[in-house]
């Protein structure tokens, strides 16, 4: 009986979505290996080996969740998951390890666990449950406010780390969902006014000097070309020097000679562009476009509102992260430390993204 159930689930499994994700992760592994091999750093090689472990573990989780986990259970345990998200974010402030100025990791030996990546999953479940139950009432202002309360609480805890990049992702996700669900013009105008007020308070009372400098340099990189503007300048040089087919793996001068910092995470797109050229960029964007095509197709076939919002939220989340990461590499957006989904190094990020894919495969199988 169990064998028949597994066999039926595998027949319904969206293999095109799964293969696309695998190709994106393999492309990421190739770039991470190139950086590690070229630099000869033991830490970089260790990162590559850890990423392979997360790759294998993540694929295993996708199948387990897709076949044996009914996504509708999340509706029942929504409140518990949201509470767990709050506990994790509070705990990391007191017991977390500070890396690059952000207290956002639990450290276990050579492994670091970033809880905010999994909090994104709990938040998506929370918002999907809320919007699927109250979508038709969101024209009423009180429901709009209610939808924001949990988001604001999580944003505050994330800002305290401080991790403004992830806070921006969380806010953008909520904003996209309320715009897609439907928003009165008067409420939209009020929201814009509140955003302006909050931005002013953020600038004058919350942002640290180095964060203000980062935004100022983003607006004008020439203000500090050898300091805050250095990373973006080097990334743009790397992208431009790749030309049509790139310099070849392990031969990128900007990344291999360490002119480009955080080359396995924040600036992996610049490394890919330098070493694989325009051809590599086209390959990456084509895979991402097909990923979104499959997700939209699944969303169109979904037959319950919770599943629909779960998929739409996932699409929005991936889109926001891709735009912020690539936009930062191109100098179009500030560098915020956001990874490129399925491509950048980072076990927590990779596993969280694969858990999203597992949940979507669960929807495909059960519908």
Image (cartoon, rainbow, N blue to C red):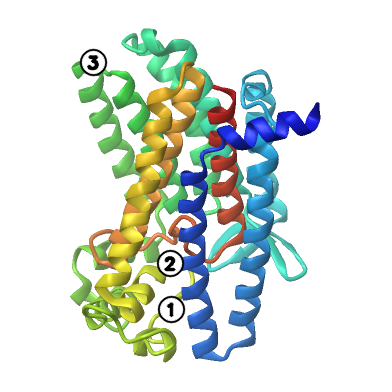
Measured Cα–Cα span from mark 2 to mark 3? 37 Å
Q: Residues within 10 Å of mark 1 (few under 14, many from 20)?
A: some
| Residue 96 visible | yes
Residues under numbered marks 2 and 1 in contact, where contact means CB atoms less than 8 Å apart:
yes
Give whichever of 180, 88 is nearer the camera: 180
Q: Quadrant of the N terminus?
A: top right
Secondary structure found at label 3 = loop
Give whichever of 116, 297 is nearer the camera: 297
Q: Quadrant of residue 186?
A: top left
Q: From the image, state whether disc 2 or disc 3 is nearer to you.
A: 2
Q: Which mark is residue 266?
A: 2
What residue is shown at x 51% (from left), y 65% (from top)?
26
Q: Does label 1 or label 3 sit earlier along the sequence?
A: 3
Measured Cα–Cα span from mark 1 to mark 3? 44 Å
Question: Which residue position holds label 3?
Answer: 184
What residue is shown at x 53% (from left), y 30% (from top)?
364
Q: Quadrant of residue 293?
A: top left
Residues under numbered marks 2 and 3 in contact, where contact means CB atoms less than 8 Å apart:
no
Q: Does label 2 or label 1 sit earlier along the sequence?
A: 1
Position of residue 38 in the picture relative to residue 355 (left or right): left
Secondary structure found at label 1 = loop
Q: Which mark is residue 261?
A: 1
């Amino acid at each position: 009986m169990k064998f028949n159930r597994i066999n039926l689930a595998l027949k319904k499994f969206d293999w095109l979505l799964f293969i696309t994700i695998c190709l994106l992760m393999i492309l990421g592994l190739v770039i991470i290996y190139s950086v590690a091999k070229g630099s000869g750093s033991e830490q970089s090689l260790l990162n590559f080996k850890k990423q392979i472990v997360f790759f294998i573990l993540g694929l295993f989780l996708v199948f387990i969740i897709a076949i044996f986990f009914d996504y509708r259970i999340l509706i029942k345990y929504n409140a518990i998951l949201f509470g767990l998200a709050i506990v994790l974010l509070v705990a990391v402030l007191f017991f977390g390890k500070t890396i690059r100025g952000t207290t956002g990791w639990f450290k276990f030996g050579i492994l670091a666990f970033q809880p905010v990546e999994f909090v994104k999953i709990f938040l998506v479940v929370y918002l999907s449950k809320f919007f699927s139950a109250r979508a038709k009432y969101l024209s009423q202002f009180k429901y709009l406010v209610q939808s924001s309360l949990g988001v604001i609480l999580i944003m505050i805890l994330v800002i305290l780390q401080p991790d403004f990049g992830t806070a921006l992702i969380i806010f953008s996700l909520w904003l996209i969902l309320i715009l897609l669900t439907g928003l009165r013009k008067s409420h939209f105008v009020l929201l814009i006014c509140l955003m302006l007020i909050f931005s002013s308070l953020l600038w004058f009372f919350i942002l640290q000097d180095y964060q203000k400098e980062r935004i100022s340099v983003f607006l004008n990189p020439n203000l500090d070309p050898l300091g805050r503007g250095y990373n973006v300048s080097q990334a743009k040089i790397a992208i431009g020097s790749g030309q049509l087919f790139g310099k070849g793996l392990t031969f990128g001068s900007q990344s291999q000679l360490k002119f480009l910092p955080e080359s396995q995470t924040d600036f992996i797109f610049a490394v890919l562009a330098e070493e694989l050229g325009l051809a590599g960029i086209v390959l990456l964007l084509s895979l991402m476009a097909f990923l979104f095509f499959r997700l939209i197709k699944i969303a169109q076939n979904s037959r319950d509102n919770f599943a629909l919002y779960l998929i739409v939220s996932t699409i929005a989340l991936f889109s926001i992260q891709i735009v912020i990461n690539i936009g930062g590499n191109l100098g179009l957006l500030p560098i915020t430390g956001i990874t490129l989904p399925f491509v950048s190094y980072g076990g927590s990020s990779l596993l969280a993204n694969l858990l999203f894919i597992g949940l979507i495969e669960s929807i495909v199988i059960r519908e």
